[in-house]
Image (cartoon, grey):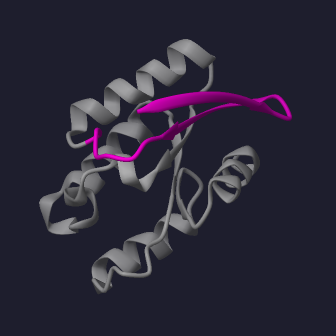
Amino acid sequence: MNIEYLNVNGTNIGVVSGNEAEITTIQAALDLAMTVKYESGGSRIAIDKRVLGEDFFILSTGVAGEILQKFINYHVKAAIFGDYSHYTSKPLKDFIYESNNGRDFFFTASREEAVERLTQAK
């Protein structure tokens, strides 16, 4: 897992990338958030969906909801970027839709779009 730090228009963003699932637990997600906060001084994270375990995208496991709740509790805004077209779950599609209409948690197709959404989030 690699974390790159960006400062876009005064907003510090940690961009997390990798090729394998390394964030598979709620504690791992919280550790990531605290690492980004400590190292960048910011509370915004763009996460490549490949570093999340597949359980995240199976809403019945509760992983996505718990991670979202932890991020909100710790005032962390996050955008997960990647291809979601192969997911057919209606609850997941609804979750993505609702998240994208909120102000704290987003799903985007690209890294650039994730950074843009996080920069614009209030």
Q: Quarter-wise, where is residue 7 in the image? A: top right
Q: Quarter-wise, where is residue 26 in the image? A: top left
Which residue is at 28% across, 46% downward? Answer: 21
Q: State which quarter of the image contains the N terminus.
A: top left
Q: State which quarter of the image contains the C terminus.
A: top right
Which residue is at 76% across, 50% downward? Answer: 120
Which residue is at 55% across, 14% downward? Answer: 39
Compared across the picture, whether 31 is left or right of 119 comes to left
Compared across the picture, whether 95 is left or right of 48 comes to left
Which residue in the rendered view is the most extreme toward the left?
Answer: 61
Q: Position of residue 37 (x, y in %)?
A: 53, 20
Towards the viewer: 112 or 41: 112
Q: Position of residue 82 (x, y in %)?
A: 50, 63
**Magenta stretch secondary structure, dominant:** strand
Residue 46 colored in magenta in the image: no
The stretch in magenta equals 1-23
Which residue is at 58% across, 67% downward? Answer: 109
Q: Position of residue 64 (x, y in %)?
A: 29, 55
Towards the viewer: 50 or 8: 50
